[in-house]
Amino acid sequence: MSVQTTDVLIIGSGHAGGMAAKVLTEKGISCLMLNAGPVVDVTRQATRKLPDELPFRGFKPPGKLEHVFQASEFNANVWVDESEVPYTFNPLHAYNWVRVRLFGGRSLFWSRQSFRLSDFELKARSRDGFGQDWPLDYAELSPFYSRVEEIMQVAGAMDGPPQMPDGNFILDKEPWSDSMKRFMAAAQPKGISVCKQRRAVGRDGLASSINLLLPDAERTGKLTSVQNAVVRQITVDKHTGLPNGCKFIDRLSHREMEVRARIVVLAAGTLESARLLLNSGLANSSGVLGHYLCDQIYGAGIVASVPEARNGRADKKLMGGGAIVPRFRNISDKHPKFLRGYALNVTSTTGAMGANNFAAYGEELDRKMDEYYGSGFHMTIMGEVLARHENHVRINHEKLDAWGIPVLHIETQYTDNEYNMAADAVDTMSEVCTDAGFEILATNKRPNPPGYSIHEVGTARMGDDPKTSVLNRWSQSHDHKNLWVVDGSGFPSSGWQNPTMTILSLSMRASERLADEMKKGNL
Amino acid sequence: MERRDVLRAMAVIAITPRWLLAQTAQNQNAAPALPAPVPWTLGLNPRTPLPQTTVADTVAETTPSYFSAAEMATLIRLSDVFMPKGERPGALDAETPAFLDFLIGHSPEVRGSLYRGGLNWLDAEAKRKFQKPFAKVSDDEAGQILKPWLRTWMTDHPPSQTHADFVNIAHADIRTATTNSRQWLDSLDDRHRDQRSQLYWSPIEPDVYAERPTSVHTRPTQTIAAPKSTHEVRSYPQ
């Protein structure tokens, strides 16, 4: 059997892998990309339907995707099915692992909020003594953010406080609605900033690896991609001890295959990358691999109503628009009940409000829903989860997935730091709503289970000390110089920010460094 | 040509070469072909009309199989109280109780227990307060039992307090099952009905879940329809 050797093997095709492919191939390096799932063609595999045309009238198929709260009967087939790729956890501490294996990964479906980390996150330990600082600072990361924002076409306003640095934006010049202005006026005395949302506009309504990154790589003629390649293990050269490719299984036929590469770039998404490294027995001389899994708390928040918008009086001047409240806790003061902080997504809505916002049924509910139509004002939390050693993943050798690969056991739970943060968010925002003259309809202080945010990061954290970190400051394994991990697993801490811009920036930075090292003959 | 026709045409064009390949492969393995005027899979093309079908709910009834007769009677009354017929069809017009029997019956046991426990509690409350089953209570009497347990709640976080959990979750399910029914959607004008459509993703093969013998995807739901044919279909070893 002849196995062709490629320069760089990239495992994963989402934002992280797509960026690596773009940067490396544009520098003339040949890449082979493997993705566990198929390429999907929306014109063939999706069609518009009404809920009554589906077997469960739009309800999530029962018993399926129990840990994907985002799933509905319409999109149930795009998520990874737990019965196909199981994972285990302590039943008292469920984990919501939300996965997409289609080509392009979760970059096909993300909600596109696009924020930069600041030194408040990157150097958080220096400020509060908890965890580990990142081995790089904002000044070093900032130029990469600017280039990523150009590619992803990030829209926003230059209105961020220091903890939410401004960027290379398509300027959002839409005026604020009056309801937002009232919210801002009520928040201001508490030292709370309210800023324009920041989101990747992308092109043609999509900001994915498959339309913004991979076409550039394909144009170079240097990228070869294989779909349905479920990687079992990264292989190692017997003589040098260095990774030299991988074994994979064809998803449909279960045929076992092998490829060779000089460099391996891992971009399978935080937990799949950790699983693959653990299953391969690589990159773990520190014993830290799999540890410090963190994400962000979601699910806590408030639903309110703007009284002046009721009874058909809502108009575009009064209602509409979204805002981000950047973290305001533990910036210039110290909160007694928790470290770090949270941000809030704020939305002024113009449509119908959900029935669960009213303790009524039947005709009374119909009247309420008519009355409150177009008056909704929503706030939901995005809070930093502390990176703790005990929140970790390991291989469960007792259980195999559909391709016979040992599955992940995920052991993680939130602590009082996260619960206190959620409670503070609801209490503080309740005061702001009341001061703004809004009526509070529903509140929730219980965060969704860990993983729900789909912002899982950590497990292969970067750092300068090989004894306490898996990757160096360039996203390169301390143990194996030709193994690079460019997805969210390298994060030493989560911050409150959606991680995509940072994943893209780190992948770009790592890939340029990798290309330089190859050019210098260091790899 | 409508968009959906264009897509359908594209789909067929994209698939056709595979059929040809499949047929070639088949012919290689099969016994010599019998003389026939036309190879038998070549008739379909982008102009082939698709037969028009309707959803089964409009012509058939589900045979309830999960809830007991008493539980079903309670669920029917509860559905009518929560979603009475008004300008739009009510829960009973939408056959919501029968649909929920199917949905809950196929769900993990924890959901079934919530429903069974809740329905039996409602019935017991009605007998305690009004000396009659819940199925026979008036709207006002039902309100006296239900209203103290109504809560407001945020998505994914229904109340967890006993009784409040069942009342609010059942209310939400009854609403969704009714407003997503053919009967309800047919009562909307074209614009509002179109707004209710969403992008549906087909299974990405292999759908391991669908291939499981217990899967409801591969098991037709019980319906009152034409009796099964008695004629025998022989099978041959592959």
Image (spheres, rainbow, N blue to C red):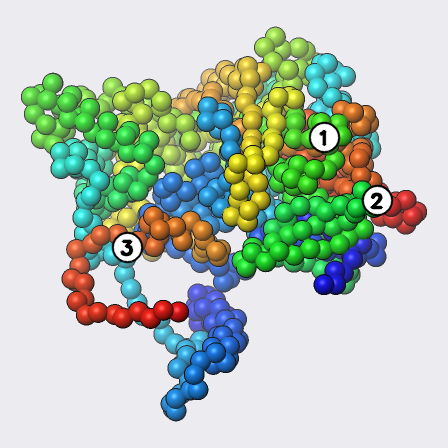
Q: Residue at x 30, y 53 (%)?
A: B219
Q: Nearest to the eye among marks 2 and 3: give it.
A: 2
Check disc 1: other Cα within 10 Å, few if <14, some if 14-19, many if 20+: many
Check disc 3: other Cα within 10 Å, few if <14, some if 14-19, many if 20+: few
Q: Out of B205 and A381, give the one closest to the viewer.
A: B205
Q: Nearest to the eye among marks 2 and 1: give it.
A: 2
Which residue is the site of mark 3? B220
Q: Secondary structure at mark 2?
A: loop
Q: Is residue B91 left or right of residue A8?
A: left
Of all chains, the one bearing label 3 is B
- Residue type at mark 2: give it: Thr
- Residue type at mark 1: give it: Arg
- Mark drawn on residue A240: 2
Give the x, y percent position of residue A481: 83, 40
Is residue A245 in sight in this rendering?
yes
Q: Out of A175 and A491, give the one closest to the viewer.
A: A491
Point out the residue furthest to the left here.
B131
Q: CA distance from mark 2 to mark 1?
A: 25 Å
Sequence-wise, the earlier of marks 2 and 1 is: 2
Q: CA distance from mark 2 to mark 3?
A: 58 Å
Which residue is the site of mark 1? A461
